[in-house]
Image: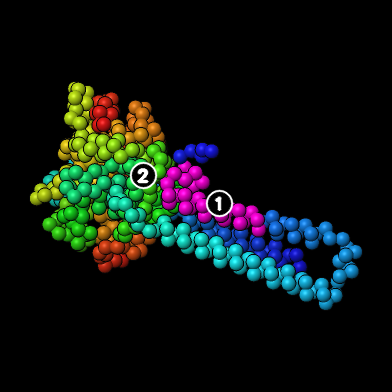
Amino acid sequence: MSFGLHSAVDPSGPQAARIAQLWWLMFWVSAGVFVAVTAFLFVALFRSAVSRQRTAGRAEAQRRTGAVVGGASIVTALIIVGLLLVDVSTTRALATAPAAAPLRIEVVGHQWWWEVHYPDETPSQAVTTANEIHIPVGRPVALELTSRDVIHSFWVPSLQGKRDLIPGHVNTAWLQADVPGLFHGQCAEFCGAQHAHMAFLIVAEPERSFSAWLADQRRPATAPASADETQGQAVFLSLPCALCHTVRGTSAWGQNGPDLTHLASRRQLAAGTLPNTHGDLAECLMDPHRVKPGVKMPPTPVESGLQALLAYLESLR
Amino acid sequence: MAFRPCLGLLLFAAGGTILLGSCRRETRRLQENPLAGARAEGIRVGQLQPGPKVSVPDTGTPYEANAYAISEGQRLYNWFNCVGCHAHGGGAIGPPLMDDVWIYGSEPANIFASIVEGRPNGMPAFRGKIADYQVWQIVAYVRSLAGLEPTSATPARDDHLQPKRKKSP
Protein backbone atom coordinates (compact mmCIF):
# COMPACT_ATOMS: atom_id res chain seq x y z
CA MET A 1 0.00 0.00 0.00
CA SER A 2 1.37 3.38 -0.91
CA PHE A 3 0.51 6.57 0.92
CA GLY A 4 2.54 9.03 -1.17
CA LEU A 5 5.48 11.14 -0.09
CA HIS A 6 4.08 12.25 3.23
CA SER A 7 2.90 9.51 5.53
CA ALA A 8 3.81 8.41 9.04
CA VAL A 9 2.22 4.96 8.51
CA ASP A 10 4.34 4.28 5.41
CA PRO A 11 7.82 4.41 6.97
CA SER A 12 10.96 4.37 4.82
CA GLY A 13 13.59 4.46 7.54
CA PRO A 14 14.36 2.83 10.91
CA GLN A 15 13.28 5.88 12.95
CA ALA A 16 9.94 6.23 11.18
CA ALA A 17 9.47 2.46 11.47
CA ARG A 18 9.74 2.71 15.27
CA ILE A 19 7.19 5.51 15.30
CA ALA A 20 4.85 3.55 13.03
CA GLN A 21 5.16 0.48 15.33
CA LEU A 22 4.21 2.63 18.31
CA TRP A 23 1.30 4.12 16.37
CA TRP A 24 -0.09 0.73 15.34
CA LEU A 25 0.34 -0.64 18.88
CA MET A 26 -1.60 2.34 20.28
CA PHE A 27 -4.18 1.98 17.53
CA TRP A 28 -4.89 -1.70 18.22
CA VAL A 29 -4.87 -1.31 22.01
CA SER A 30 -7.26 1.64 21.73
CA ALA A 31 -9.43 -0.30 19.29
CA GLY A 32 -9.56 -3.25 21.75
CA VAL A 33 -10.50 -0.97 24.63
CA PHE A 34 -13.17 0.69 22.51
CA VAL A 35 -14.71 -2.64 21.53
CA ALA A 36 -14.66 -3.88 25.15
CA VAL A 37 -16.22 -0.70 26.53
CA THR A 38 -18.90 -0.71 23.83
CA ALA A 39 -19.69 -4.37 24.56
CA PHE A 40 -20.13 -3.66 28.30
CA LEU A 41 -22.27 -0.64 27.48
CA PHE A 42 -24.60 -2.76 25.34
CA VAL A 43 -24.81 -5.45 28.04
CA ALA A 44 -25.82 -2.77 30.57
CA LEU A 45 -28.35 -1.24 28.19
CA PHE A 46 -30.11 -4.40 27.12
CA ARG A 47 -30.06 -6.41 30.32
CA SER A 48 -33.67 -7.28 30.95
CA ALA A 49 -35.53 -5.33 33.60
CA VAL A 50 -36.43 -8.66 35.26
CA SER A 51 -32.84 -9.72 35.89
CA ARG A 52 -32.03 -6.22 37.15
CA GLN A 53 -34.81 -6.37 39.72
CA ARG A 54 -33.87 -9.88 40.77
CA THR A 55 -30.27 -8.97 41.63
CA ALA A 56 -30.88 -5.43 42.97
CA GLY A 57 -29.82 -4.88 46.56
CA ARG A 58 -28.28 -8.34 47.05
CA ALA A 59 -24.92 -8.36 48.82
CA GLU A 60 -23.53 -10.89 46.33
CA ALA A 61 -24.41 -8.65 43.36
CA GLN A 62 -22.82 -5.63 45.02
CA ARG A 63 -19.59 -7.54 45.59
CA ARG A 64 -19.55 -8.61 41.95
CA THR A 65 -20.02 -5.01 40.75
CA GLY A 66 -17.16 -3.91 43.00
CA ALA A 67 -14.90 -6.62 41.57
CA VAL A 68 -15.73 -5.65 37.96
CA VAL A 69 -15.12 -1.91 38.54
CA GLY A 70 -11.91 -2.55 40.52
CA GLY A 71 -10.63 -5.02 37.92
CA ALA A 72 -11.36 -2.61 35.06
CA SER A 73 -9.49 0.19 36.88
CA ILE A 74 -6.43 -2.01 37.36
CA VAL A 75 -6.46 -3.15 33.71
CA THR A 76 -6.76 0.50 32.57
CA ALA A 77 -3.81 1.53 34.74
CA LEU A 78 -1.73 -1.38 33.45
CA ILE A 79 -2.50 -0.54 29.82
CA ILE A 80 -1.57 3.11 30.32
CA VAL A 81 1.68 2.27 32.14
CA GLY A 82 2.49 -0.31 29.45
CA LEU A 83 1.97 2.24 26.66
CA LEU A 84 4.09 4.75 28.59
CA LEU A 85 6.96 2.25 28.82
CA VAL A 86 6.81 1.50 25.10
CA ASP A 87 6.65 5.24 24.37
CA VAL A 88 9.72 5.98 26.52
CA SER A 89 11.71 3.17 24.91
CA THR A 90 10.74 4.41 21.41
CA THR A 91 11.78 7.97 22.25
CA ARG A 92 15.09 6.71 23.63
CA ALA A 93 15.72 4.69 20.48
CA LEU A 94 14.99 7.76 18.31
CA ALA A 95 17.44 9.89 20.31
CA THR A 96 20.29 7.36 20.29
CA ALA A 97 23.18 8.05 17.95
CA PRO A 98 23.54 5.36 15.28
CA ALA A 99 26.67 3.20 15.21
CA ALA A 100 27.81 4.08 11.68
CA ALA A 101 29.53 7.42 10.96
CA PRO A 102 26.72 9.82 10.10
CA LEU A 103 26.54 12.47 7.40
CA ARG A 104 26.24 15.88 9.07
CA ILE A 105 23.74 18.35 7.67
CA GLU A 106 22.88 21.71 9.20
CA VAL A 107 19.38 23.06 8.65
CA VAL A 108 18.44 26.67 9.46
CA GLY A 109 14.77 27.63 9.50
CA HIS A 110 13.72 30.98 8.06
CA GLN A 111 10.34 32.59 7.50
CA TRP A 112 9.42 30.69 5.23
CA TRP A 113 12.12 28.49 3.77
CA TRP A 114 14.86 26.07 4.78
CA GLU A 115 18.57 26.82 4.54
CA VAL A 116 20.66 23.65 4.18
CA HIS A 117 24.42 23.34 4.79
CA TYR A 118 26.68 20.40 4.11
CA PRO A 119 29.72 21.36 6.23
CA ASP A 120 33.21 20.27 5.22
CA GLU A 121 36.61 20.46 6.88
CA THR A 122 37.74 22.58 3.95
CA PRO A 123 35.51 25.67 4.02
CA SER A 124 35.55 26.04 0.23
CA GLN A 125 34.10 22.53 -0.08
CA ALA A 126 31.09 23.27 2.11
CA VAL A 127 27.79 23.37 0.26
CA THR A 128 24.83 25.65 0.87
CA THR A 129 21.47 25.03 -0.73
CA ALA A 130 17.81 25.47 0.15
CA ASN A 131 14.55 23.57 0.44
CA GLU A 132 15.95 20.34 -1.04
CA ILE A 133 18.00 17.96 1.07
CA HIS A 134 19.83 15.14 -0.67
CA ILE A 135 20.85 12.18 1.49
CA PRO A 136 22.56 8.86 0.68
CA VAL A 137 20.43 5.73 1.11
CA GLY A 138 21.28 3.47 4.04
CA ARG A 139 23.58 5.94 5.80
CA PRO A 140 22.51 7.69 9.00
CA VAL A 141 22.18 11.46 8.79
CA ALA A 142 22.80 13.75 11.77
CA LEU A 143 20.70 16.88 11.44
CA GLU A 144 21.70 20.00 13.35
CA LEU A 145 18.67 22.22 13.49
CA THR A 146 18.43 25.87 14.39
CA SER A 147 16.40 28.91 13.37
CA ARG A 148 17.18 32.48 12.42
CA ASP A 149 13.85 34.07 13.40
CA VAL A 150 11.01 32.19 15.10
CA ILE A 151 10.47 28.57 16.17
CA HIS A 152 9.95 26.17 13.28
CA SER A 153 9.65 22.39 13.31
CA PHE A 154 11.33 19.91 10.96
CA TRP A 155 9.03 17.06 10.00
CA VAL A 156 9.45 14.34 7.40
CA PRO A 157 6.74 11.86 8.41
CA SER A 158 8.08 9.06 6.20
CA LEU A 159 11.50 9.23 7.88
CA GLN A 160 11.36 10.78 11.35
CA GLY A 161 9.19 12.51 13.93
CA LYS A 162 9.05 16.26 14.52
CA ARG A 163 11.95 18.25 15.92
CA ASP A 164 11.79 21.96 16.69
CA LEU A 165 14.20 24.54 15.26
CA ILE A 166 14.78 27.08 18.00
CA PRO A 167 16.55 30.43 17.53
CA GLY A 168 19.88 30.54 19.34
CA HIS A 169 19.90 26.80 20.08
CA VAL A 170 21.00 23.77 18.07
CA ASN A 171 18.76 20.69 18.20
CA THR A 172 19.88 17.33 16.89
CA ALA A 173 17.87 14.68 15.07
CA TRP A 174 18.82 11.44 13.34
CA LEU A 175 17.27 10.03 10.26
CA GLN A 176 18.01 7.40 7.68
CA ALA A 177 16.32 6.41 4.43
CA ASP A 178 16.33 2.70 3.62
CA VAL A 179 14.99 3.11 0.10
CA PRO A 180 15.76 5.69 -2.58
CA GLY A 181 13.01 8.14 -3.35
CA LEU A 182 11.44 11.52 -2.71
CA PHE A 183 10.08 12.36 0.72
CA HIS A 184 8.03 15.40 1.55
CA GLY A 185 8.81 17.50 4.62
CA GLN A 186 6.83 20.29 6.19
CA CYS A 187 7.21 22.90 8.91
CA ALA A 188 5.16 21.57 11.82
CA GLU A 189 5.17 24.58 14.15
CA PHE A 190 3.06 27.59 13.24
CA CYS A 191 5.58 30.25 12.24
CA GLY A 192 3.63 33.05 10.56
CA ALA A 193 1.55 33.91 7.53
CA GLN A 194 3.17 31.43 5.13
CA HIS A 195 3.68 28.52 7.54
CA ALA A 196 1.64 26.27 5.23
CA HIS A 197 3.99 27.11 2.34
CA MET A 198 7.14 26.10 4.19
CA ALA A 199 7.83 22.67 2.77
CA PHE A 200 10.92 20.87 1.53
CA LEU A 201 11.94 17.71 -0.26
CA ILE A 202 14.28 14.98 0.88
CA VAL A 203 15.91 13.21 -2.05
CA ALA A 204 17.29 9.85 -0.96
CA GLU A 205 19.63 8.41 -3.57
CA PRO A 206 22.38 5.78 -3.80
CA GLU A 207 25.78 6.83 -2.39
CA ARG A 208 27.26 7.26 -5.88
CA SER A 209 24.69 9.66 -7.26
CA PHE A 210 24.66 11.49 -3.92
CA SER A 211 28.43 12.06 -4.17
CA ALA A 212 28.02 13.23 -7.75
CA TRP A 213 25.29 15.67 -6.67
CA LEU A 214 27.42 16.99 -3.81
CA ALA A 215 30.42 17.47 -6.12
CA ASP A 216 28.16 19.32 -8.53
CA GLN A 217 26.82 21.60 -5.79
CA ARG A 218 30.39 22.50 -4.77
CA ARG A 219 31.06 24.17 -8.10
CA PRO A 220 30.57 27.93 -8.27
CA ALA A 221 27.76 29.05 -10.55
CA THR A 222 28.02 28.38 -14.26
CA ALA A 223 29.32 31.43 -16.13
CA PRO A 224 26.73 32.91 -18.52
CA ALA A 225 27.14 31.28 -21.93
CA SER A 226 24.88 33.31 -24.23
CA ALA A 227 24.30 37.03 -24.68
CA ASP A 228 20.89 36.64 -23.06
CA GLU A 229 22.37 35.03 -19.96
CA THR A 230 25.10 37.68 -19.72
CA GLN A 231 22.46 40.39 -19.84
CA GLY A 232 20.41 38.47 -17.26
CA GLN A 233 23.37 38.32 -14.91
CA ALA A 234 23.83 42.08 -15.23
CA VAL A 235 20.12 42.57 -14.45
CA PHE A 236 20.41 40.28 -11.42
CA LEU A 237 23.41 42.11 -10.03
CA SER A 238 21.91 45.58 -10.60
CA LEU A 239 18.57 44.84 -8.93
CA PRO A 240 17.89 44.37 -5.19
CA CYS A 241 18.31 40.56 -5.71
CA ALA A 242 21.99 40.60 -4.81
CA LEU A 243 21.35 42.16 -1.39
CA CYS A 244 19.61 38.99 -0.18
CA HIS A 245 20.68 36.13 -2.47
CA THR A 246 24.03 34.47 -3.08
CA VAL A 247 25.24 33.21 -6.43
CA ARG A 248 28.67 31.80 -5.69
CA GLY A 249 31.21 32.97 -8.24
CA THR A 250 29.60 36.41 -8.64
CA SER A 251 29.54 39.52 -6.47
CA ALA A 252 26.08 38.57 -5.12
CA TRP A 253 26.56 37.20 -1.64
CA GLY A 254 23.53 38.31 0.35
CA GLN A 255 22.69 35.96 3.19
CA ASN A 256 19.02 36.74 3.80
CA GLY A 257 17.39 34.63 1.09
CA PRO A 258 18.00 31.17 -0.39
CA ASP A 259 21.33 30.47 -2.13
CA LEU A 260 20.66 30.53 -5.88
CA THR A 261 23.99 29.13 -7.11
CA HIS A 262 22.29 25.95 -8.41
CA LEU A 263 18.69 27.13 -8.50
CA ALA A 264 17.84 25.35 -11.74
CA SER A 265 18.91 21.99 -10.29
CA ARG A 266 16.15 22.15 -7.68
CA ARG A 267 12.75 20.60 -8.23
CA GLN A 268 10.61 23.23 -6.52
CA LEU A 269 10.40 26.99 -5.96
CA ALA A 270 9.50 29.09 -2.91
CA ALA A 271 9.89 26.25 -0.38
CA GLY A 272 7.72 23.66 -2.08
CA THR A 273 5.06 26.15 -3.19
CA LEU A 274 5.51 25.79 -6.96
CA PRO A 275 7.26 23.43 -9.36
CA ASN A 276 10.45 24.86 -10.83
CA THR A 277 9.21 25.81 -14.30
CA HIS A 278 9.76 28.81 -16.55
CA GLY A 279 6.33 30.34 -15.91
CA ASP A 280 6.34 29.75 -12.16
CA LEU A 281 9.81 31.25 -11.84
CA ALA A 282 8.61 34.34 -13.71
CA GLU A 283 5.64 34.65 -11.35
CA CYS A 284 7.89 34.34 -8.30
CA LEU A 285 10.09 37.16 -9.62
CA MET A 286 7.35 39.54 -10.74
CA ASP A 287 4.89 39.17 -7.89
CA PRO A 288 6.10 36.97 -5.03
CA HIS A 289 3.33 38.38 -2.82
CA ARG A 290 0.72 36.78 -5.02
CA VAL A 291 2.41 33.39 -4.72
CA LYS A 292 3.08 33.73 -0.98
CA PRO A 293 1.33 36.78 0.55
CA GLY A 294 3.51 38.28 3.27
CA VAL A 295 6.72 36.73 1.96
CA LYS A 296 9.90 38.67 2.77
CA MET A 297 10.91 39.00 -0.88
CA PRO A 298 9.79 42.36 -2.30
CA PRO A 299 8.17 42.49 -5.74
CA THR A 300 10.80 43.61 -8.20
CA PRO A 301 10.04 45.83 -11.18
CA VAL A 302 12.12 43.89 -13.73
CA GLU A 303 10.20 45.05 -16.81
CA SER A 304 12.22 44.57 -19.99
CA GLY A 305 14.96 42.52 -18.35
CA LEU A 306 12.64 39.69 -17.31
CA GLN A 307 13.34 37.22 -20.11
CA ALA A 308 17.09 37.73 -19.81
CA LEU A 309 16.91 37.32 -16.03
CA LEU A 310 14.90 34.10 -16.43
CA ALA A 311 17.42 32.78 -18.96
CA TYR A 312 20.23 33.51 -16.50
CA LEU A 313 18.49 31.91 -13.51
CA GLU A 314 17.62 28.84 -15.56
CA SER A 315 21.27 28.47 -16.55
CA LEU A 316 22.25 28.08 -12.88
CA ARG A 317 22.32 24.29 -12.90
CA MET B 1 -36.08 33.92 36.28
CA ALA B 2 -35.39 33.43 32.61
CA PHE B 3 -34.74 37.15 32.24
CA ARG B 4 -31.49 37.17 34.24
CA PRO B 5 -29.24 34.98 32.05
CA CYS B 6 -30.64 36.74 29.01
CA LEU B 7 -29.54 40.12 30.38
CA GLY B 8 -26.09 38.74 31.22
CA LEU B 9 -25.67 37.43 27.71
CA LEU B 10 -26.75 40.79 26.30
CA LEU B 11 -24.26 42.68 28.47
CA PHE B 12 -21.51 40.23 27.48
CA ALA B 13 -22.28 40.73 23.77
CA ALA B 14 -22.35 44.51 24.15
CA GLY B 15 -19.05 44.52 26.04
CA GLY B 16 -17.50 42.24 23.43
CA THR B 17 -18.60 44.52 20.62
CA ILE B 18 -17.04 47.52 22.33
CA LEU B 19 -13.81 45.58 22.91
CA LEU B 20 -13.71 44.50 19.25
CA GLY B 21 -13.40 48.15 18.31
CA SER B 22 -9.96 48.26 19.91
CA CYS B 23 -8.64 45.43 17.71
CA ARG B 24 -8.15 47.60 14.66
CA ARG B 25 -4.89 49.43 15.06
CA GLU B 26 -3.33 49.88 11.68
CA THR B 27 -3.32 48.48 8.19
CA ARG B 28 -0.96 45.59 7.64
CA ARG B 29 -0.40 45.34 3.93
CA LEU B 30 0.77 41.94 2.78
CA GLN B 31 0.94 42.85 -0.88
CA GLU B 32 3.10 45.84 -1.60
CA ASN B 33 3.46 47.81 -4.75
CA PRO B 34 7.19 48.00 -5.48
CA LEU B 35 6.83 51.62 -6.51
CA ALA B 36 4.65 52.65 -3.57
CA GLY B 37 5.47 55.83 -1.71
CA ALA B 38 6.42 59.09 -3.28
CA ARG B 39 10.13 59.42 -3.84
CA ALA B 40 11.61 62.15 -1.70
CA GLU B 41 13.48 63.77 -4.54
CA GLY B 42 15.39 66.93 -3.77
CA ILE B 43 14.57 67.05 -0.09
CA ARG B 44 16.16 70.02 1.63
CA VAL B 45 18.59 69.39 4.42
CA GLY B 46 19.03 72.89 5.86
CA GLN B 47 16.61 75.53 7.15
CA LEU B 48 18.32 78.49 5.49
CA GLN B 49 17.20 79.69 2.09
CA PRO B 50 17.70 82.76 -0.06
CA GLY B 51 14.89 84.99 -1.22
CA PRO B 52 11.27 84.71 -0.17
CA LYS B 53 10.18 81.78 1.99
CA VAL B 54 9.02 78.76 0.02
CA SER B 55 6.55 76.45 1.70
CA VAL B 56 7.82 72.88 1.67
CA PRO B 57 5.21 70.24 0.88
CA ASP B 58 4.66 67.89 3.77
CA THR B 59 6.05 64.50 2.80
CA GLY B 60 5.07 62.08 5.56
CA THR B 61 5.93 58.44 5.53
CA PRO B 62 3.22 55.98 4.53
CA TYR B 63 4.14 54.07 7.70
CA GLU B 64 3.86 56.74 10.38
CA ALA B 65 2.84 55.06 13.68
CA ASN B 66 2.48 51.66 12.01
CA ALA B 67 3.66 48.93 14.40
CA TYR B 68 3.96 46.24 11.72
CA ALA B 69 6.05 48.51 9.49
CA ILE B 70 8.32 49.43 12.41
CA SER B 71 8.97 45.77 13.22
CA GLU B 72 9.58 45.02 9.53
CA GLY B 73 11.96 47.99 9.48
CA GLN B 74 13.82 46.52 12.41
CA ARG B 75 14.29 43.24 10.53
CA LEU B 76 15.49 45.05 7.39
CA TYR B 77 17.82 47.25 9.47
CA ASN B 78 19.61 44.02 10.42
CA TRP B 79 19.29 42.38 7.00
CA PHE B 80 20.84 45.23 5.08
CA ASN B 81 23.59 45.67 7.63
CA CYS B 82 22.71 49.11 9.00
CA VAL B 83 23.84 47.55 12.30
CA GLY B 84 27.33 47.22 10.87
CA CYS B 85 27.96 50.97 11.26
CA HIS B 86 25.13 52.41 13.37
CA ALA B 87 24.90 49.44 15.78
CA HIS B 88 21.44 49.13 17.29
CA GLY B 89 21.05 52.88 17.36
CA GLY B 90 23.96 53.67 19.64
CA GLY B 91 26.35 54.30 16.76
CA ALA B 92 29.78 52.89 16.05
CA ILE B 93 31.76 53.98 13.02
CA GLY B 94 28.50 55.57 11.88
CA PRO B 95 26.69 58.23 13.88
CA PRO B 96 24.19 57.17 16.55
CA LEU B 97 20.53 57.22 15.56
CA MET B 98 18.94 57.36 18.97
CA ASP B 99 20.14 60.80 20.06
CA ASP B 100 18.75 64.24 19.23
CA VAL B 101 21.45 65.13 16.69
CA TRP B 102 20.29 64.79 13.09
CA ILE B 103 22.99 65.92 10.69
CA TYR B 104 20.69 65.60 7.67
CA GLY B 105 17.30 66.11 9.27
CA SER B 106 14.90 63.92 11.20
CA GLU B 107 11.84 64.22 8.95
CA PRO B 108 10.88 60.92 7.29
CA ALA B 109 11.73 62.35 3.89
CA ASN B 110 15.20 63.40 5.14
CA ILE B 111 15.96 59.90 6.42
CA PHE B 112 14.60 58.40 3.21
CA ALA B 113 16.94 60.63 1.22
CA SER B 114 19.90 59.72 3.44
CA ILE B 115 19.33 56.02 2.77
CA VAL B 116 18.56 56.31 -0.93
CA GLU B 117 21.13 58.98 -1.87
CA GLY B 118 23.87 58.14 0.59
CA ARG B 119 25.82 60.77 2.56
CA PRO B 120 29.46 61.87 2.58
CA ASN B 121 31.97 60.08 4.78
CA GLY B 122 30.75 56.57 4.34
CA MET B 123 26.97 56.28 4.10
CA PRO B 124 26.36 54.21 0.95
CA ALA B 125 23.53 55.02 -1.47
CA PHE B 126 20.96 52.22 -1.49
CA ARG B 127 19.06 53.55 -4.52
CA GLY B 128 17.73 50.67 -6.57
CA LYS B 129 18.99 48.11 -4.06
CA ILE B 130 16.12 48.25 -1.57
CA ALA B 131 12.48 48.46 -2.62
CA ASP B 132 11.01 51.88 -1.82
CA TYR B 133 8.38 50.58 0.58
CA GLN B 134 11.11 48.75 2.50
CA VAL B 135 13.14 51.96 2.75
CA TRP B 136 10.06 53.64 4.26
CA GLN B 137 9.80 50.78 6.76
CA ILE B 138 13.44 51.30 7.75
CA VAL B 139 12.71 55.05 8.05
CA ALA B 140 9.88 54.30 10.48
CA TYR B 141 12.18 52.08 12.55
CA VAL B 142 15.04 54.60 12.57
CA ARG B 143 12.64 57.27 13.79
CA SER B 144 11.39 54.93 16.51
CA LEU B 145 15.00 54.50 17.70
CA ALA B 146 15.07 58.19 18.57
CA GLY B 147 11.63 58.08 20.13
CA LEU B 148 10.02 60.00 17.26
CA GLU B 149 7.32 57.40 16.73
CA PRO B 150 4.44 57.10 19.21
CA THR B 151 5.00 54.54 21.96
CA SER B 152 1.72 52.85 21.00
CA ALA B 153 3.38 51.62 17.79
CA THR B 154 6.88 50.81 19.02
CA PRO B 155 7.62 47.51 20.73
CA ALA B 156 7.21 47.58 24.50
CA ARG B 157 10.38 45.62 25.04
CA ASP B 158 13.23 45.92 22.60
CA ASP B 159 16.02 43.38 22.59
CA HIS B 160 18.55 46.15 22.11
CA LEU B 161 19.26 49.65 23.36
CA GLN B 162 16.43 52.01 24.03
CA PRO B 163 16.59 55.77 24.35
CA LYS B 164 14.89 57.59 27.17
CA ARG B 165 11.35 58.13 26.02
CA LYS B 166 10.52 61.71 25.30
CA LYS B 167 7.12 63.03 26.21
CA SER B 168 4.77 61.28 23.83
CA PRO B 169 4.94 63.13 20.49
| Res A222 → quadrant | top left
**Quadrant where the image shows the C terminus of chain A:** top left
**Quadrant where the image shows the N terminus of chain A:** top right
Residue B71 point in image, percent of width and height: 33, 54
Residue A123 visible in the snapshot: yes
Q: Which chain carries label 2?
A: A
**Residue A138, which numbered label?**
2
What residue appears at the point 19 percent right and 24 percent down from the top-left corner?
A225
Magenta span of residues: A6-33
- Badge 1 vs badge 2, beta-carbon distance below 8 Å: no
Q: Along the horizontal axis of the image, is A47 left or right of B151? A: right
Spatial CA distance of label 1 from label 2 is: 24 Å
| Res A177 → quadrant | top left
Q: Along the horizontal axis of the image, is A75 left or right of B119? A: right
Q: Which of A252 and A72 is in front in this view?
A: A72
Q: Does the magenta stretch include residue A26?
A: yes
How many residues crowd mark 2 within 10 Å: few (<14), some (14–19), many (20+)?
A: some
Q: Which colour scheme is used?
A: rainbow
Q: Which of A231 and B94 is in front in this view?
A: A231
Residue B118 point in image, percent of width and height: 15, 45
- Mark 1 or 2: in front is 2
Q: Does the magenta stretch include residue B67?
A: no
How many residues crowd mark 1 within 10 Å: few (<14), some (14–19), many (20+)?
A: few
Q: Nearer the viewer, residue B145 or B105?
A: B145
Residue to which mark 1 is pinned? A24
Label count reads 2
- SS class, disc 1: helix
Residue type marked 1: Trp
- SS class, disc 2: loop
What residue appears at the point 89 percent right and 68 percent down from the top-left corner?
A53
* Residue situated furthest bottom in the rendering: A59
